[in-house]
Image (tube, rainbow, N blue to C red):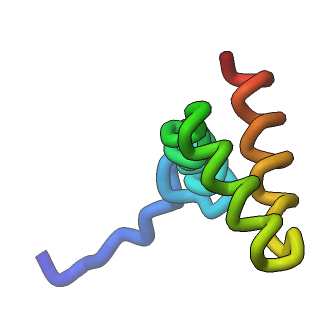
Amino acid sequence: MSQRLAARPTGATRPRTRTRALLGPACVAAIAYVDPGNFATGVESGTRFGYLLLWVEVVASGMAVLLQ
């Protein structure tokens, strides 16, 4: 019982595999609320605040096209 075995990282614990496993749900969560109302709200806020975050709408729309 005093001997410890060094465990090698499995696929789920490796950093790259873990990152890839989290990207799918992250993409779905990123586009989950991109509906016409939220899109219009984003564009409206962009016009009021100088289009600083309009790139978020473009990226989210692109992700929605790819995933749907």
x, y (%) of residue 62?
A: 83, 35
**Side of 3 relative to 62 (left or right):** left
x, y (%) of residue 40?
A: 66, 45
**Quarter of the image containing the N terminus?**
bottom left
**Side of 60 relative to 4 (left or right):** right
**Side of 32 relative to 44 (left or right):** left
Residue in view at x 77 percent, y 36 percent: 61
* Of the pair 53 and 63, the residue shown nearer to us: 53
x, y (%) of residue 28?
A: 55, 37
Q: Is residue 11 visible?
A: no
> In the image as oriented, which residue stretches furthest toward the left?
1
Question: Is 51 rendered above or below residue 54?
Answer: below
Total labels: the figure holds 0
Q: Is residue 23 visible?
A: yes
**Quarter of the image containing the C terminus?**
top right
Residue in view at x 43 percent, y 71 percent: 6
Q: Quadrant of residue 42?
A: bottom right
**Side of 22 relative to 64 (left or right):** left
Q: Quadrant of residue 51?
A: bottom right
x, y (%) of residue 18?
A: 56, 53
Q: Quadrant of residue 47?
A: bottom right
Question: Is 15 rendered above or below residue 25?
Answer: below
Residue in view at x 49 percent, y 57 percent: 13
* Of the pair 65 and 22, the residue shown nearer to us: 65
* Of the pair 4 and 62, the residue shown nearer to us: 62
